[in-house]
Image (cartoon, rainbow, N blue to C red):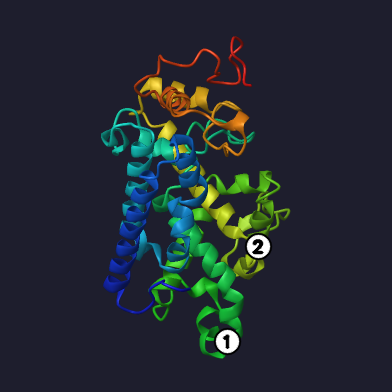
Amino acid sequence: MCGVPVGLDRAAVSSWCNKKADVYGNFTKKLVSLEIGVQNRFALLLFCSRPSAKLNRFFRITPPSLSTEAAAIADTHLAAAVAAITHTPAAFYQTGHPLALRARLHAPITASSHTAGDGGGAGFASLHTIAPGAYLASFIDTLPHLAAREVTAAYVSDPTSFASSSSCSPALKEVAEHFTSITTNPYFSELALDWGTEHIHRALTDAPTPDTATSIPNITLLPRAAGRHSQRSLTQVLQRSAMVAFTRSSSLPLDVKCSISQSSQHGAGLFLSTVPSTADLRLTDQEFLQNYWHRFGLLGALQVLADRSCASTCRKFPPR
């Protein structure tokens, strides 16, 4: 892919990814400076300028061991952009801050029916979290082409050897490592519950038998998932696992846990993902900021507009 580094110089590849992450940072600074209103800038950042969209090709092709630092850099630039757009101190978005805004940025806006409690965020996927899933999905899509070429077929003919063979490249070893870590994740089985992801779960697992009550992941089945948009499914497992670990942390303050629960309610965060295409969908800067501050427990939380609702369960001011 154009602009993606390849080669045996691992330090050079890693350095190139870091530079591209900083280029992304310069891009977000230009977006933040646009004089188009807070809601419009946030919408552009969420729908067009997320690191997982702008830099996805780098993390699909570059092994996570070489792109981890770049992913963290890109996530930091994203947090800085959100802080600037929403008029909140950048320090609030540092890892370890009591408000936990850094982690909540990467959580879904609302919870899905079978993953209750995983919402309450801003909808920006963390590159650092999803990079292994993106890389594995890219390999899955590429595998049939590698197997069809004489020069590469021998290297990918036996996926079971990726982890153990001394002749396998570090890139293939990482494929095996991330396949194992994702498919043994407790939330991998949840893919079978969603019509949009169950095909990937079925493709990567052996069907249950009388001796096995559950489907068993099988790395030799990787070709079955090729061309089936597996990245969405694999990264979903990683995001879900990270969010649950975050919300169940004993160090997370109770008021933040309550805030996440309330703002996960259906409809509570629609203002974040609404494209202001018509007059009735547009919010003034003050309206958007007050909703945002209230959702995340920030300054101005007590200045909620009287005609707006903070959750779908609010009886006095139900959603418009």
Q: State the separation of the CA atoms marked 1 and 2.
A: 21 Å
Return the residue nearer the eye: 168 or 212.
168
Q: Quadrant of the C terminus?
A: top right
Residue 133's x, y, as percent?
49, 57
Residue 310 versus residue 238 in the image, above or below: above
Kindly indicate the quadrant of the structure image that contains residue 187. top right
Q: Earlier in the sequence, mark 1 or mark 2?
A: 1
Q: Residue at x 33, y 53 (%)?
A: 25
Residue 304's x, y, as percent?
46, 16
Question: Neighbour class for label 2 at 10 Å: few (<14), some, many (≥20)?
Answer: some
How many numbered discs sit on the rendered protein?
2
Q: Mark 2 falls on what kind of element?
A: loop
Residue 110 versus residue 226 in the image, above or below: above
At label 1, the amino acid type is Arg
What residue occupies the far bottom of the structure in this picture? 150
Q: Which labelled disc corresponds to residue 149?
A: 1
Q: Which residue is mark 2?
A: 228
Question: Neighbour class for label 1 at 10 Å: few (<14), some, many (≥20)?
Answer: few
Residue 250's x, y, as percent?
36, 28
Q: Residue at x 40, y 41 (%)?
A: 35
What residue occupies the far top of the structure in this picture? 316
Note whether residue 161 is visible: yes
Residue 154 lies left or right of residue 62; in this view the side is right
